[in-house]
Image: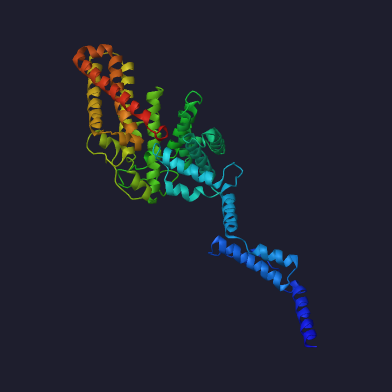
Amino acid sequence: MLELQLSSKSQTEHVDVINTDTTAGPPINATDWTMHFDMPQADWNETLESASETVDQAGWQDNGIQSQLQQTLIQPEEIAIVSLQHGKATNEILDSTGLSHLMKLDLDQLYFDRVHPLIPMVHRSHYLAWAKLDDVSLPQKCLRWAMRALAASMSSQFRSRSEEFYNKARRLAEGLDAGDLVLPWLNSDTSIEQAQTWLLLAHYELLDPSKYSQSATTRRAFRLVHLSRLHCTDWKDPALDFPSCTPGTSQSATLPFASVEERRRTFWVAFCLDRFLGGYEESPMTIHDETIHVHLPCPEWNFQISSEVNMGFINDVLIGGTPVPASSPFAKLVIAMALFGQCILHKKITAKCPTSDQESLTFWVRHELLAEAIDRQVALLSLTQTDVEYEPLHFMTSMVVHGSVLKLENAINVAHSVVQSQQPVANDYAKTAYKAAISMADLSESMTGSNCLKV
């Protein structure tokens, strides 16, 4: 009798377990029971086998419950694989532009590693603060694509897409210009990103001059620089003795140092491009020295951390009154470009002016002033292979200074009748120009073993 009672009780408990109403509570979700255990693989397998044996011994023969238990006991390596696949999918999802999140981060890093050292005008922190956003202004979108185009052109990974990025940036920039409802010369409400976009597009086109019409792009870039009044960033009213508010930025006097410095650097990038094209294409220079009221660019470190430092004006440095800080390679390049532009003007004036005794005297006065200024710059140049490898602006500055010597020699060759009165001086300077040409050849040869993407 006792055995029958115990057997009946066991069957009742067995039925209760199997026929439990699962709808009484929330359904069991296997992922809710998934836990991370710090257990060796062998121990985990042993635990899983023990659990299965326990199920069999208890008489839980229901396939649904046993399957659910086995799914709950996910092995550690499976958890890791699922986690990695989820992260990989998130970072590699391509958006409508065909770029993933990681690709965008790579392009931003490429720009500041390889483009910014040559064109140091975009403030990194300011850019990264809005670059990760989708909802940005149209000028910012233009700038972002222009930066990606140049970054891709200097990358083996993205080079095949640089043309695509360039075309997208140009279409957006042209659409932005076409949206102006007023005459261009009456619209001073121009963002700094617009000017930066067209300057970057102009530099991109320099990579293949035979393919692009450089003049149209540079004209737009210089027009926006003038409309933004960047050449008057540090202009002071002599009567009031305080920085004037530039049109379109009525509160420019209260802007953070980094924002003001970004305006300065954008102008100086345009200035260097203007002087380079004046020597490379013999095109008329657009930015005139007498209209410039902008401090020289500060050292890169001060710019990036927004630490204010007082820099002089370019004319003060050219006359020898203010030294250029050694920690500001960009300022040295600006000075060299200014001298290069003056040598170009010296040559053009010599070629156009009629020959006379007065002109002969004026020619040699200009020549001596420029030669002395160039000598001061040459004395400041002490390039090493390390400078060429890791600071491309040093390399560019040296090439520009030596190129200025060659421009002076070209001016002497143009003024045949003027040279006759000072033939010994002309012969001596021909030797100086020969040495400058040798120095340029040596610098060019030194670059053959360097990373071509850095210069």
Residue 311: x and y in percent read 29, 43
Q: Is residue 221 shown to the viewer in this render?
A: yes
Residue 28: x and y in percent read 69, 68
Which quadrant is the C terminus positioned in? top left
Q: Quadrant of residue 73?
A: bottom right
| Count of numbered circles on the image | 0
Which quadrant is the N terminus positioned in? bottom right
Instruction: Note whether 79 is above or below 365 in the view shown.
Output: below
Instruction: Note whether 425 is above or below 85 in the view shown.
Output: above
Residue beneath the point at 74% across and 65% down: 64
Residue 213: x and y in percent read 50, 25
User: Horizontally, is 9 left or right of 394 in the view?
Assistant: right
Q: Quadrant of residue 29?
A: bottom right
Colour style of the rendered protein structure:
rainbow
User: Horizontally, is 45 left or right of 108 in the view?
Assistant: right
Q: Is residue 358 shown to the viewer in this render?
A: no
**In-front residue for pair 51/99:** 51
Q: Quadrant of residue 395?
A: top left
